[in-house]
Image: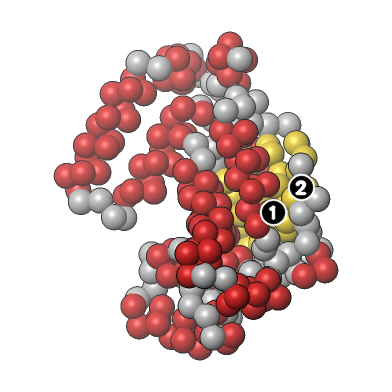
Amino acid sequence: MSHTLLTRREGDVLVLSNNNVAARNALSFEFYIAVTDALRDAASDPSVGAIVLTGEGGHFCSGGDLRQLAKRRELSVQERRVRLEGLHDLIRAVRDCPKPVIAAVEGAAAGAGLSLAMACDMLVAAKDAKFTVAYVKVGLTPDGGATAFLAEFVSRQVLTELCLTGAPLSGERMHDLGAVNRLVESGSALPTAMALAVDIAKGPQKAMSHIKNLCRHAMRNSLKDQLELEAQSMVEAMGSDESLEGIHAFLNKRQPNFSQLRQVSE
């Protein structure tokens, strides 16, 4: 595994930590590949129930490495696009991963770091974390889905102001907007995210994958299309071993044991 990404397991939870502390965890092509590979492996590993994405040294991610970005003016437009797609492939990998991905944010989540945090399914943030669409301050434009993710929470006018000024949003403000699931004191983002991940990891993996997909499409689909997607998922879930275990557990007044189904599938 790349030294820019630290990985560890805590039970059913896989922890992925950005490890470029000297640059406040600025992104690199190496990091894109390492996280994308880790997510792909986790997707096919039944022992992984949830994933936590965080950063070392008190910062989540300060965005793109400006020293590297400055060199890209020497590349052709096509070559620049190839480099950019490394980031976008990472964002797609987070959104498409069938396992729940939870961001634990301390310090900076700037530029593409904001995009990466908001691509996750849930977000735990310290009150004093700083979320910034910082591109305009260095003559660049947003990427990594930043405008798409923010548009789910703010009006066009507020989105435009955030992108044109590069003004930071605190963890508290992001929580007020509905973009943060758990707001915590400084230094508590990771343990809180871990507790949430441990609880979620106990759930039925196939059903949770479908739920993640439903939630991903809910705000963009028409009611007609969302009803169809829900119907497809529900009909499949009705015939699953997970629903058999879940319903039997409920009727017998016991906790369901979905982990046993993963062991059988292995």
> Residue at (69%, 39%) from the top-left corner?
14
Q: Nearer the viewer, residue 95 or 87?
A: 87
Please report whichever mark, 2 or 1, sits nearer to the chain's N-terminal start.
2
The residue identified by callout 2 is: 2
Query: Callout 1, which amino acid?
Result: Glu
Q: Quadrant of the N terminus?
A: top right
Question: Residue 147: x and y, percent?
Answer: 43, 70
Q: How many C-alpha atoms fall within 10 Å of the one at disc 1: few (<14), some, or many (≥20)?
A: few
Cα separation, mark 2 vs mark 1, equals 7 Å
> Residue at (29%, 55%) from the top-left corner?
220
Q: Is residue 58 above or below residue 36?
A: below
Q: Nearer the viewer, residue 44 or 99?
A: 44
Residue 150 visible here? no
Q: Is residue 143 above or below residue 85?
A: below
Residue 30: give its label.
1
> Residue at (25%, 31%) from the top-left corner?
231
Question: Residue 34: x and y, percent?
Answer: 68, 47
Question: Residue 43: x and y, percent?
Answer: 56, 33
Q: What secondary structure is marked by label 1?
A: helix
Q: Nearer the viewer, residue 12 or 43?
A: 43
Q: Is residue 246 above or below residue 5?
A: above
> Image quadrant of residue 46?
top right
Q: Given contact means CB atoms under 8 Å apart, are the residues at marks 2 and 1 in contact?
A: yes
Q: Quadrant of the C terminus?
A: top right
Query: Callout 2, which amino acid?
Result: Ser
Q: How many C-alpha atoms fall within 10 Å of the one at disc 2: few (<14), some, or many (≥20)?
A: few
Q: What secondary structure is marked by label 2?
A: loop
Task: Check the image and tell me how it is coloured.
Answer: secondary structure
